[in-house]
Image (cartoon, coloured by chain):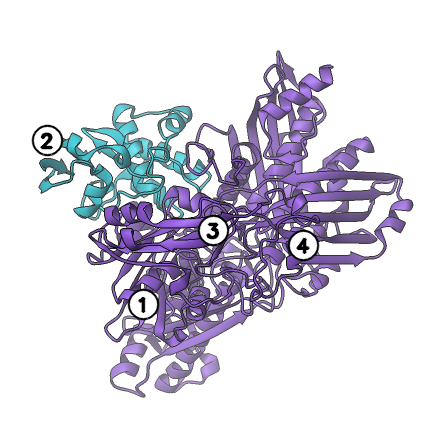
Amino acid sequence: MRIAFTVNGRLHELDIDPGEYLLEVLRRIGYKSVRRSCNSASCGTCTVLLNGKPILSCSTFAVSIDGQNIETVEGMADGDKLHPIQEAILEEGGAQCGYCIPGVVMTGEALLRENPDPSDEEIRLALNGNICRCTGYEPQNRAIKKAAQVMRGEIDE
Amino acid sequence: MNDSFVTIGKSMKKVDGLAIVRGKPAYTPDYDMPDALVVKLLRSPHAHAIIRSIDSSQALSIPGVVGIFTYQDVERVPYTRAGQGYPEPSPYDTYLLDRKVRYVGDPVAVVAATTEKAALKALRKIKVEYETLDAVFDMKEASKEGSPIIHDESDCSGVYDNSRNIAAHFVMDIGDVEKTLEECEFVIRRTYHVDTQLHAALEPHNALTYLDPVGRLVVISSTQVPFHCRRILSRILKKPIAEIRVIKPRIGGGFGGKQSVIAEPYAALVTLKTGKPARIAYTREEVSMATNIRHEMSYDVIVGAAGDGKIKAISLHGISNTGAYGEHCLTTFMVSGSKTLPLYNKVDAVHFGGDIVYTNLPPAGAYRGYGAPQGLFPLDCAIDELAYEMKMDPLKLKEMNSIREGETSPIFEIMGEGREGVPQIMRSCKLQECIDLGRKAIGWDSKWGKKKRNGNKVRGVGCALAMQGSGIPKIDMGAATIKMNEDGSFNLLVGATDLGTGSDTILAQIAAEVLTVPLEKIIVYSSDTDLTPFDVGAYASSTTYVSGNAVRLAAEKVKEKVLDLAAEYLEKDRSELTLESGVIRGKDGSSVSLSELCTMHMYTFNQQQISESASYVGEESPPPFAASFAEVEIDTDTGKITLVNFVSYADCGLALNPVQAMGQLEGGSMQGIGWALYEDIIYGKDGRMLTNDFFTYKVPSRMDYGKLTCGLVDSYEPTGPFGAKSIGEIGIDTPIPAISNAIFDAAGIRLRHAPFKSERVLFEILNMEV
């Protein structure tokens, strides 16, 4: 069946199997940042934004996003300029193996759009579904906090 | 001291960081290969069985199914999956496919199909008739008379005693423990048990294989050990090493789980059988139950001390569960002694020993800490118990008996990895500084022994000291090649394997520092057996120390070469010249830049490629040290354990990149916290792992801890590159003992079986009330 949706503002129209998951479709059309880990909606690795809200693409049927808007980490930087969350993750050591990072960045972005000044507790709660096995979470939590400050114009990048 | 360096000691951003945060295709699954066959494995539903017959005819008739291979289609070659130095100190007890299956999940058949759907359908259509055998799951039963023999095949080798399921055995004695104990005023005798743990790296094991245009086998794999992978594939597949190329791109975590050659051989088999590219990608369930897990261990521990608190004798006698196959079995067991016992080096007598046994459970393997945390739990907690027996502050007891700079332990020489070790004196040991900072950060003096109560909640604190190593001395080798480009940049080629640790970055920092150029001028390429020099890979906390020293030596050789060539060009005495900020200068103001020098030597003058290689094998393995502290809160109504604060300070020598080094300590601590409190593997009665996904196996998430406070102390290891030692593993060693000790301080309950469950605490509370 044929569906149409946008990814990072770009329109995609393509044929899919009715049983295909969004994760497979996004990877197939080149969005490799969307990564498979648990494949059962329990680790957050494959998080993308659907109309601005984080969803798990491994357990979302591709057919259900017909006519809607997806955002992935590929769309976060502005040319060579990284998004403040991406920049802060690099500075704070929030990425080790990096496999969880696309999901962490997208969930963090959704949080900061809704709540530009989250407390430590709110950051932890919002990203609780994003498992990271490398960093012990602290550097990533610091990075989200720092990115929020940058986005609010309180500190320079 | 750091101020004199340009890149060393600075928290440079990861050289692969941009690709990672932008989500660029960088990992093995991101390599597109449209015509690659999908490889799936049919796995045994039985823990112990003989295959009577396999009928693939129906499965083969499914459209899209290209091939199905069983033990009848592969040459029988005993090997070990362990990615270790060669010859490996692990038994050759594994077969690519065998007529016998030894755990639930053991591969039975390999399916290759053009689509995943067809491959999955074929798995259901293969008919296998099994003759089931009795199985043994309890490691304490495995070597008893009458237990089923798991490796009864005649062609395995290196097994200590097949007939009793003992894969390996080790015993070591210094002095006479029993005699020394007679002189001790206080003696603690206990049994401690620690369960297994899953690595749970987020990128599942996967590999892509194909033949290059001249028929060589190319393997792109999520591996920690590309060179060991090439050697082992060569053995199993009977293909010369010269005809195999293993490439490790970015990998999504390893923690030891990818220090064995697991999935690659099945994809490679399909490529060799069909001539077609093949891709294998394990599911999360397969990663959990059919790759490898941590060795479960149990120890009878004895600690004896004189009345003044001097620990005089230690004995650790234990048993380790290697599961169905013996990869890393002897070495992880030895490390549980060799990287814990030297901590308490003032003893008169030490005993260490025991058996590593087979069971019909998933094979154990390498896992961050590599046995050390399993040994530290009994050792540290027994000393903690001793302190309470003596009515002493446990931190004080550990402090006064632990090793310090300038000291040694005979264990270093007696116990290596699979063989004898090397004697070494602690050139750098800032354990006291770690203790002092940690004690302050947790508030030890105001909290220990106080049992601060708030309604039904009571708090307590516990401490643990740890050490690890920096590579395997006289065994592990790392090499580096540096070649110069005409813009004054350098290609740094290393066999070392960055599994997310940041090793590409710190190795580049070392080269940049020696060559006096900015980090951007060092282009790192790592882990490709065709293009990079040999390196054993990422394990045993070795990369910074072993590979780092190789990079330092290679860079120094390039620097010498550059100065020689500049002396010739500038017509100056070599000793007059200095290299600073990428420019060679003479005393008289004459100068030539690296870029000018290289351009000249490429195109016009004394033409040659400026390039050098160097190798390094550690003469020693300087241990990093750590002092960790846990504060817990126990709900005395429900038994619920809450981790309020975890503090860990480490001495890793000079931290070449403080942010990356801290990340190792923070990450290791969290993985240890998970193991201590949340990560619990449950098997069914049939030996099937029931907790094989992230719903049932609880990796800690962001709401599962209170505070995590880590820090590095100032230190300098003279034998390390720019003063560095390792930091990759040590963080995981302390959470189990520190948390166990804290639970005791809070609630008076001594939990000697990890992980620590709230139910257990509640039962203990109820028992005490009765």
User: Decide: marks 1, 4 in contact (CB < 8 A)?
Assistant: no
Mark 4 closeness class: few <14, some 14–19, many ≥20 residues within 10 Å: some
User: Decide: marks 2, 3 in contact (CB < 8 A)?
Assistant: no
Q: What chain does mark 3 sit on?
A: B
Q: Amino acid at mark 2?
A: Gly
Residue at image coords 45%, 54%: B52
Separation of residues labelled 2 and 3 (CA atoms): 42 Å
In the picture, the quarter occupied by the C terminus of chain B is top right
Residue B272 marker: 1
Residue B164 marker: 4
Left or right of B125 on screen, residue B420 = right
Separation of residues labelled 1 and 2 (CA atoms): 45 Å
Q: Amino acid at mark 3?
A: Gly
Q: Colour of chain B?
A: purple
Determine the secondary structure under disc 2. loop
- Would you name the residue on which mark 2 appears? A67
Determine the secondary structure under disc 1. helix
Task: Tell me the cyan chain.
Answer: A
Residue B257 marker: 3
The picture places residue B704, in percent across and down from the top left corner, at 48, 29
Single out the mark in the foreground, 1 or 2. 1
Marks 2 and 3 on same chain:
no
Q: What chain does mark 1 sit on?
A: B
